[in-house]
C-alpha cells in the first residue's frame, strides 16, 4: 500500500513560498498573483501503518513549524502543479527520509518518492502559469508530476533491446554529421565528430553503436575532458603590456621545463599556462617537500606538525575543482558535486578535510528575464541555486567554508565559473601506498 501526505510550513514562516511569490511577481512580471502555497508531498510504500503514523511527526514534519495533510483540496487554487525529480535523478529528500525511518525501525528501508506541489492564487493567465512552471522546472533534473496516487512505487524496468547501430555514420557528409550533433544533443562539435568518424572508418571499419557514441561524447565534454582548458592556442594577440610580459615569462618557463624545441611536440593551452609554475619550481628543485606517488588525487606536501608537544611528519593536501558546465545546466547539483569532488580526493588520500573556499563567477543576478540568453537559466536562479547546492553538501559533512567570493561580470553569462577548493591533513604514517603485484586479490566493498 502507498501512503501519501502533504507537508506545509505554517503561516508566517513559509519563507520559501513568500520568496517564490516575490520572484514570480517582480522577476517574471506575474502581477495578478496574490499568494503561493508550497507543499512537500511524500509517497511511502513498504512500511507498517503504525511506523508510518509515527514517522509523520518524527521524520516527515516538525510539529512546531509544519502542518500535515493526509489529503488536500486544491480546487480553490487558481493553478496547481507538482514537480518531481526525473527517473534516476537522486532525490535527497526521499533518501534522507528513508534512512531516518530505517534507523527508527531497524528493519528494511521503505520506498519513498517526493514531489513539490505549488498552489497559486490570484488572477492568472495561461501564459502566467506556463512561466511559473518553467521557472521551477529545470528539464535537466525534474518534470511535472501527476496527482494520481500510484498503486506502487516499485519501478518496472523493461529488458533493454539490442543496442542500435548508427547506420551509415562513417559515410555521412558534413550536413549528416550536423544532424547527428543536433538530434543527439552532443557535446562534440562538427570537427570533433568528424575526427571520430575518421577513426571508425579507418581503424574500426564499421559504424558505431549508439552507446559508444554516448560514452565518447560524455568523456569528450567540457566537464570530463576540460575541452576549454585543453584547447590548442595557435595564435594570440595581447594588448595589455603586463599580460604580455606574463605570457613571455610563461614561454620562457615552457622552454626551461620541456626543452628548447617544446613547440614542436607540446601545444600551448590554458591548462599548460595554469600548471607551468609548479612544474618550473619542481624542475629547479625548489619543491623538496612535495609527496610524489602514482596517485594523482590532491597536491600533497610534507610538513612538520606539533602534536602534544612532539614533532610529527604530516601530509598537507590541497585540492581544487571546477564544475562550470554542470553548474550552468543544473546549478544545485553542479555546485554540490564541485565541493564534493574536492572533498573526495583528499579523502581517497586518507586525509580529513578541514577547510574550504568557494570562488564563482556569474552574470548580473539582477538582470531581467528578457536579458537571459536562449536556452540558459536566469542568472538569479543560477546564483541562488548554486549557493544552496554548495552549502548543502558542505553542511552535510560539517565542512567550514572560510572564504566565499562571487564575481559578477558579463563574461560569465554564457558559461558560469564554479570553483571549489579544500585543505586537508593527515599523519604521513597513516597514508600507506602500495603497488599491486601479480597474484594480489582485490576485494571491492559496497
Image: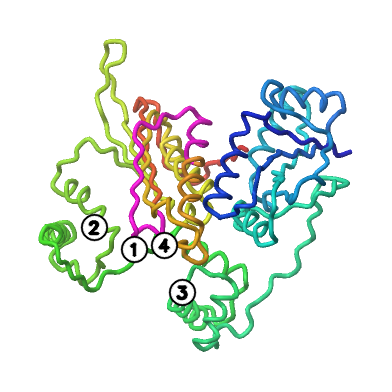
- Which residues are drawn in magenta? 390-416
Residue 420 locus on image (x, y percent)? 39, 43
Question: Which label's residue is closer to the chain start, 3 or 2?
Answer: 3
How far is disc 4 from disc 2 in space, using C-alphas? 23 Å
- Residue assigned mark 2: 273
Label number found at residue 189: 3
Q: Residue at the spot x=55%, y=82% of the render? A: 205
Between 193 and 366, the residue placed more toward the observer is 366
Residue 429, by quadrant, is: top left
Q: On the rendered structure, is 287 left or right of 383? A: left
- Residue assigned mark 1: 230
How far is disc 3 from disc 2 in space, using C-alphas? 25 Å
Q: Is residue 392 magenta?
A: yes
Question: Which label's residue is closer to the chain start, 1 or 2?
Answer: 1
**Image quadrant containing the N terminus:** top right
Question: Which label's residue is closer to the chain start, 4 or 2?
Answer: 2
- Residue assigned mark 4: 414
| 287 over 144 or under it: above or below | above
- Density class for disc 2 (Cα within 10 Å; few <14, some 14-19, many ≥20) is some
Number of marks in the image? 4
Amino acid at each position: 500500500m502507498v501512503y501519501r501526505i502533504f507537508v506545509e510550513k505554517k503561516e508566517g514562516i513559509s519563507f520559501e513560498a513568500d520568496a517564490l511569490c516575490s520572484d514570480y511577481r517582480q522577476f517574471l512580471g506575474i502581477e495578478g498573483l496574490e499568494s503561493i502555497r508550497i507543499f512537500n508531498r511524500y509517497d511511502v510504500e513498504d512500511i507498517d501503518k503504525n511506523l508510518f503514523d509515527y514517522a509523520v511527526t518524527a521524520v516527515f514534519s516538525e510539529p512546531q513549524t509544519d502542518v500535515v495533510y493526509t489529503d488536500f483540496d486544491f480546487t480553490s487554487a487558481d493553478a496547481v502543479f507538482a514537480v518531481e525529480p526525473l527517473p534516476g535523478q537522486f532525490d535527497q529528500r526521499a533518501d534522507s527520509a528513508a534512512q531516518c525511518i530505517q534507523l527508527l525501525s531497524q528493519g528494511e528501508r521503505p520506498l519513498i518518492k517526493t514531489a513539490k506541489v505549488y498552489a497559486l492564487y490570484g488572477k492568472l493567465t495561461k501564459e502566467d502559469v506556463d512561466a511559473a512552471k518553467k521557472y521551477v522546472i529545470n528539464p535537466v533534473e525534474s518534470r511535472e508530476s501527476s496527482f494520481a496516487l500510484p498503486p506502487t512505487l516499485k519501478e518496472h524496468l523493461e529488458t533493454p533491446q539490442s543496442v542500435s547501430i548508427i547506420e551509415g555514420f562513417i559515410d555521412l557528409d558534413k550536413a549528416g554529421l550536423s544532424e547527428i550533433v543536433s538530434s543527439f544533443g552532443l557535446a562534440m562539435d562538427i570537427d570533433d565528430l568528424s575526427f571520430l568518424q575518421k577513426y571508425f572508418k579507418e581503424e574500426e571499419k564499421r559504424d558505431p553503436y549508439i552507446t559508444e557514441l554516448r560514452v565518447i561524447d560524455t568523456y569528450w565534454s567540457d566537464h570530463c575532458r576540460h575541452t576549454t582548458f585543453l584547447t590548442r592556442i595557435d595564435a594570440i594577440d595581447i594588448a595589455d603590456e603586463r599580460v604580455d610580459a606574463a605570457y613571455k615569462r610563461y614561454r620562457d618557463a615552457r622552454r626551461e621545463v620541456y626543452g628548447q624545441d617544446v613547440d614542436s611536440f607540446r601545444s600551448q593551452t590554458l591548462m599548460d599556462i595554469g600548471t607551468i609554475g609548479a612544474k618550473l619550481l619542481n624542475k629547479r628543485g625548489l619543491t623538496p617537500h612535495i609527496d610524489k606517488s602514482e596517485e594523482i588525487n590532491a597536491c600533497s606536501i610534507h610538513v612538520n606538525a606539533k602534536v602534544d608537544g612532539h614533532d610529527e611528519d604530516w601530509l598537507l593536501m590541497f585540492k581544487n575543482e571546477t564544475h562550470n558546465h554542470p553548474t550552468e545546466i543544473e546549478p544545485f547539483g553542479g555546485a554540490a558535486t564541485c565541493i564534493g569532488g574536492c572533498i573526495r580526493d583528499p579523502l581517497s588520500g586518507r586525509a580529513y578535510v578541514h577547510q574550504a573556499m568557494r570562488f564563482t563567477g556569474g552574470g548580473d543576478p539582477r538582470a531581467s528575464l528578457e536579458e537571459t540568453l536562449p536556452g540558459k537559466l536566469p542568472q538569479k536562479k543560477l546564483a541562488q541555486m548554486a549557493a544552496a547546492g554548495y552549502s548543502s553538501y558542505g553542511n552535510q559533512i560539517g565542512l567550514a567554508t572560510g572564504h566565499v567570493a562571487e564575481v559578477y561580470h558579463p563574461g560569465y553569462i554564457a558559461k558560469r565559473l564554479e570553483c571549489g577548493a579544500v585543505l586537508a591533513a593527515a599523519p604521513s604514517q597513516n597514508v600507506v601506498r602500495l603497488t599491486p603485484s601479480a597474484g594480489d586479490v582485490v576485494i571491492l566493498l559496497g
